[in-house]
Image (cartoon, coloured by chain):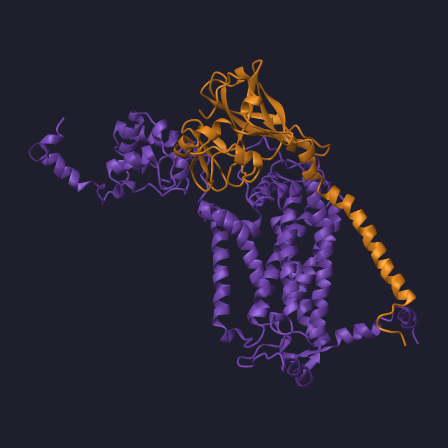
Amino acid sequence: MGLIAQVGQWFDRRLQLAAPIREITEHPVPRNTASWFYVFGSAALTVFILQLVTGILLALIYVPSASEAWSSLQALNHDVALGWFVRAMHGWGSNFMVAIVLIHMVQVFLFGAYKFPRELTWIIGVFLLLMTLGMAFTGQVLRFDQDAYWGLGIGASIASRVPIAGPMIVKLMLGGPIIGGATLSRFFALHVFVIPGMLIGFVALHLLMVLKLGINEWPMPGRLVKKTTYENEYHQLTRTDGAPFVPYAVWKDLFFAAFILLAVAACAIYFGPFGPTGRPDPTVIQTAPKPDYFFLWLYGLLSYLPPSLETPALLIGPVVAIAGLVLLPFLSGEGEKSWRRRPIAVLTVLLIAVTLGTLTHLAGFTPWSPHMNAWSGDPVPDKFLHSSTALQRQGALVFQAKQCRNCHSIGEGGGQRGPALDSVAVRLTQDQLIRQVIQGGGNMPAYGKNLSPAETTALVAFLESLHPRTQSPARDAARDMILRDEPAKHPDTQP
Amino acid sequence: MPNENTISRRGLFMKMGILFNGVVATALAVPIVGFLLSSITRGRANGYLSWVSLGPVKDFPEGETRLATFRNPFVTPTDGKTVDTACWVRRVEGDQFQVFAINCAHLGCPVRWFPQSGLFMCPCHGGAYYRDGSRASGPPERGLFEYPYKVQGGVITIQAGELPTPGSPTASLLEKKPPCAARNDLAPRNDLISIDGGKLYASRETNASPGEKKPWA
């Protein structure tokens, strides 16, 4: 017997792990599960391990103190050899992890894998998703820059809306009355100890159940799940059409895991680390904070919800969403598994994906935010000033100087908060323009107190000139008639 | 064979052991929970709010709104720059001021003042406020948060110390209502309540000189 085998036997006599490991690796899985669709779970685990390793490496340098965190990140980026690379791997790893966990969840949902007897596996998976998002948010806080600082303020503002307990939750979350040293310390504890500890435990449980209950077979349209017969059918399947997990199915997991690690590394090298952006100094207010990628959809949603719906949506929405996910296997724990015969399931996934995708896309250019520098920075396009009168030019100046441009675009530049004004004269008559400018309305502030009559006249003259050459400006036909006929028909309206 | 109603000596000891651990765990839970909730209870006991100076009144010209900064009265050793807070100071006339929190009443982003259009604009979700802090447009449900202030010896001081959030008690008590609503609510708004050291004061007069004009009048 070789030396290695002898050493191995010495250990196994004491550890007694060889037999259970062999049992796990060689357990039979249905042949049709050796598919590229079944690699996302192991890929999520791979990225999680990558995050553990890179996270520990970052902790060698990072200082979780509000006064020093930002500087220690700068040191990681610029002073420590390959510190930038480890930061970039950790940052991109988190993006990949959220994405892979979501893809895994969609695959499990569409393949009916949450049905009997794997309900608890799904529920633990829901908690794993929440913890992954928790890691993403707390991780964004640890990158203690301007975005992290104001992002915490947004989190506190949301938490404060909880009835009665809101202010207490805010103080508990911040560790004090303001965002400060205690806040960063407790988010560090959450990100480094609490959530990862729970993640490791829940991942272990999740995996154990996959082993105990067997991987979900490839769903066949028409093969319905019944609680009374499913387990026998599954064991029959693995006996007649099964193959050992190692090596029959595992090679695809291995290839995909390596591919994902390469992809993370490629993104890390090409795009580099995330931030940190500006120093977390609350007196520097020239900032437009933005959440990280996976929360951009929420940023968009909070801009579009009507004010009256916002608090209920923020407080009830997550509860309903989580309850829906947890209750899903109890609501449809039996029956059809194949997505080919579950059109509502497919449409639900598509609807959620399109919604989240659209909101994320919109959050990329934030049409709801005023462009703070448009009034001073964006030029008035030549075509709108061509052969204009002195009054109209004065109006263009008022338009810029009163920051109208921050919310209204003309030509290329300007905010998109309000409607574009390139052809506003076609839509609104002179009277309507005056009324809109003075009184506001329709989500526009009233400018009556900030415009002199002369400025209003000039501004409206400029706005009236904003119409395509082929379209004449809107006019009030009734007014023309009244003005023409007034002396004859309305003598009593004369002064 | 043991009767169902009897209990063995070892079984009794085990149950007593569990009970003993339960008692110890409960006793230990008191300081642990107390520690965890210290950021809440501390606020109750001593109060995070204090009066802090924004500087001499002459730094704020009448009719203008200027950015001022102050150091948060509650500081811990690792806070760094985060204790430096900004606020907008509007001097209406004389000793009549309005001091607005920098945080948007929607989700807390820093609002910017544009004197030309007389608006505060928020870069995040597009909330806008008029010069008196009342809501102009966008998602905020209310006007800007206002700090209680007083002018003494030519210096303006404000009562600050907590991050203003839509749900905080100070925020709801200092709410700036739109003019039409304020007309009906004039009486209750005149004896505005301020929170000092966790205690409610019946009126702003307790903290301000009797002749002080009210900023919302």
Farthest residue, direction top: B153
Q: For chain B, give the colour.
A: orange
The x, y position of residue A203, in whole percent, is 70, 62
Quadrant the C terminus of chain A occupies: top left
- The correct choice, above or below, for A375 with respect to A62 in the image is above
- The correct choice, above or below, for B42 with respect to A169 in the image is above
Query: Residue A259 versus residue A215: which sits nearer the camera?
Result: A215
- The correct choice, above or below, for A232 with respect to B4 in the image is below
Q: Tell me if residue A364 can be seen.
A: no
Query: Residue A490 versus residue A355: which sits nearer the camera?
Result: A490
The x, y position of residue A182, in whole percent, is 70, 38
Q: For chain A, give the colour.
A: purple
Quadrant the N terminus of chain A occupies: bottom right
Horizontal side of residue A441 vs A473, given as left or right: right
Residue drawn 50% across and 68% down? A346
Farthest residue, direction left: A488
Horizontal side of residue A210 vs A347, given as left or right: right
Q: Tell me if residue A324 can be seen.
A: yes
Horizontal side of residue A76 vs B166, given as left or right: right
Determine which quarter of the picture holds residue A96. Answer: bottom right
Query: Residue B149 versus residue A153: which sits nearer the camera?
Result: B149
The x, y position of residue A173, in whole percent, is 65, 43
Residue drawn 72% across and 39% down? B38
The x, y position of residue B152, in whole percent, is 57, 16
- The correct choice, above or below, for B92 with respect to A351 in the image is above
Count numbered badges in the picture.
0
